[in-house]
Amino acid sequence: MPVSITHLVRDRRTVTVPVGDESLTVTYRPGGFTPETEARLRQYADDQRGGAALVALLADCLVEWDLLDEAGKPLPINAKALSSLPTLFLSQVVQAISEDMRPNPPSAGASGAG
């Protein structure tokens, strides 16, 4: 059955990110990570702007989360709001997304060498 580009763009996944004793639920678009995004991230890395790279990736990929501001409202997902967050926290979110996007590693018992 054919797959449409719309299906790729609309795909959503949800992960849980441990944050201290709490957990953050994050919904993201796997299709938000594109070669264009990768090129921007590489440029940020070349310019030694790691925090900006995290913001760019998350701004392109995040759809929803349950991170609240001081007033108890969901923090908006945009570059300005993301830029105000600690780099370590942004790294944790990116790591959780990266791990979720990885294909499942083969188990030791699944070897065909048997």
Image: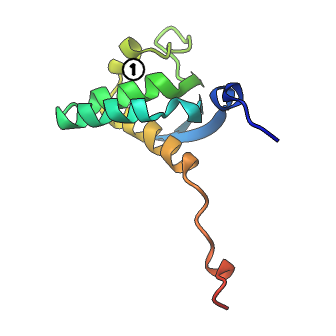
Q: In the image, residue 54 lies at what x, y percent?
A: 36, 31
Callout 1 crowding tier (Cα within 10 Å): few <14, some 14–19, many ≥20: many
With respect to residue 107, does 87 lie above or below?
above
Q: Residue furthest left?
A: 47
Residue that appears at 38% across and 36% down: 38
Quadrant holding the N terminus: top right
Secondary structure type for disc 1: helix
Q: In the image, residue 29 lies at what x, y percent?
A: 59, 30
Describe residue 107's horizontal placement relative to residue 84 as left or right: right
With respect to residue 87, does 71 lie above or below?
above
Q: In the image, residue 3 lies at what x, y percent?
A: 74, 36
Q: Nearer the viewer, residue 79 or 81?
A: 79
On the question of residue 47 being in view, the answer is yes
Q: Nearer the viewer, residue 80 or 105?
A: 105
Instruction: Say which quarter of the image contains residue 16.
Output: top right
Residue that appears at 36% across and 12% down: 80
Q: Residue furthest right?
A: 1
Residue that appears at 36% across and 23% down: 85
With respect to residue 47, does 18 lie above or below?
below
Q: Residue furthest bottom?
A: 114
Q: Which residue is mark 1?
A: 82
Instruction: Say which quarter of the image contains residue 48.
Output: top left
On the question of residue 25 being in view, the answer is no
Three-letter amino acid code of the residue under disc 1: Leu
Q: Residue furthest front?
A: 2
Quadrant holding the C terminus: bottom right
Q: In the image, residue 95 lies at what x, y percent?
A: 44, 44
Describe residue 51's horizontal placement relative to residue 18 as left or right: left
